[in-house]
Image: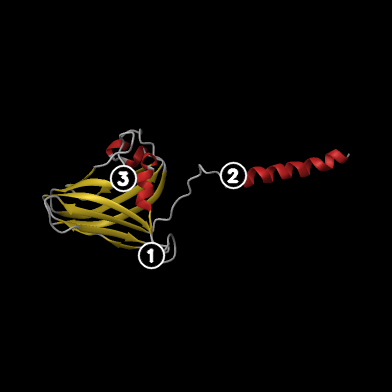
Amino acid sequence: MKHSRLLPLLLLALLFTVTSCEKDDPDVNEEELITTLTYTLSPVGGGADVVMTFRDLDGDGGDAPVITGGTLDAGVQYNGAITLLNEAESPAENITEEVEGEDLEHQFFYETSVAGLTVAYADMDADGNPTGLATTVSATTVGSGTLKVTLRHEPNKSGEGVADGNITNAGGETDIEVTFDVNVE
């Protein structure tokens, strides 16, 4: 009879021990807060940079983010660079470095409704798959629309079309997604 009373207590103690160890797992990668995404487009051959920004200092909820799109010149090719920050910390934490260090587990995707605007990958991870922190952007015709930038964590980089920037079969979880208004003049 004594053993039947101890068994539930032993099981409870075992359960507590197992669950309390899980949070200390060094392999668990907690999602970082990204408050700011800056997409800088530098014209090949010189000229003024086009800087598009997303800033949401209070994270999801609360105040609406401030999003600034950009105007590109038709017929110009641009080198693009993404910068990610967590400005909720002081000093701001550079999340770009984490994405670079974990490039096998991250990929940016670029979707546009602007005719004649194309975005190509200019960087690769250690396995030769695109990361998308660096891009080449071409604006061939006058028009306007949107450019959506999405960062996926743990995408299936071998999924059909994923290496070409098709997010449809990428899977994974979205770390940040921003839609910029873009004009091409």
Identify the image quadrant of residue 85.
bottom left
Given the image, on which type of amino acid does mark 1 rest? Ala
Q: Counting residues from the N terminus, which is met first, the one under dot 1 or under dot 2?
A: 2
Q: Nearer the viewer, residue 71 or 154?
A: 154
Number of dots carrying numbers: 3
Q: Which residue is mark 1?
A: 64
Q: Counting residues from the N terminus, which is met first, the one under dot 2 or under dot 3?
A: 2
Dots 2, 3 in contact, CB < 8 A: no
Q: Which residue is mark 2?
A: 22
Image coordinates of residue 35 in percent, x first then y, are 38, 59
Given the image, on which type of amino acid does mark 2 rest? Glu
Residue beneath the point at 68% across and 46% down: 16
Q: Is residue 12 above or below residue 53?
A: above
Image coordinates of residue 52 in percent, x first then y, are 26, 58
Residue beneath the point at 35% across and 51% down: 96
Front: mark 1 or 2: 2
Q: Which mark is residue 3?
A: none
Q: Residues within 10 Å of mark 1 (few under 14, many from 20)?
A: few
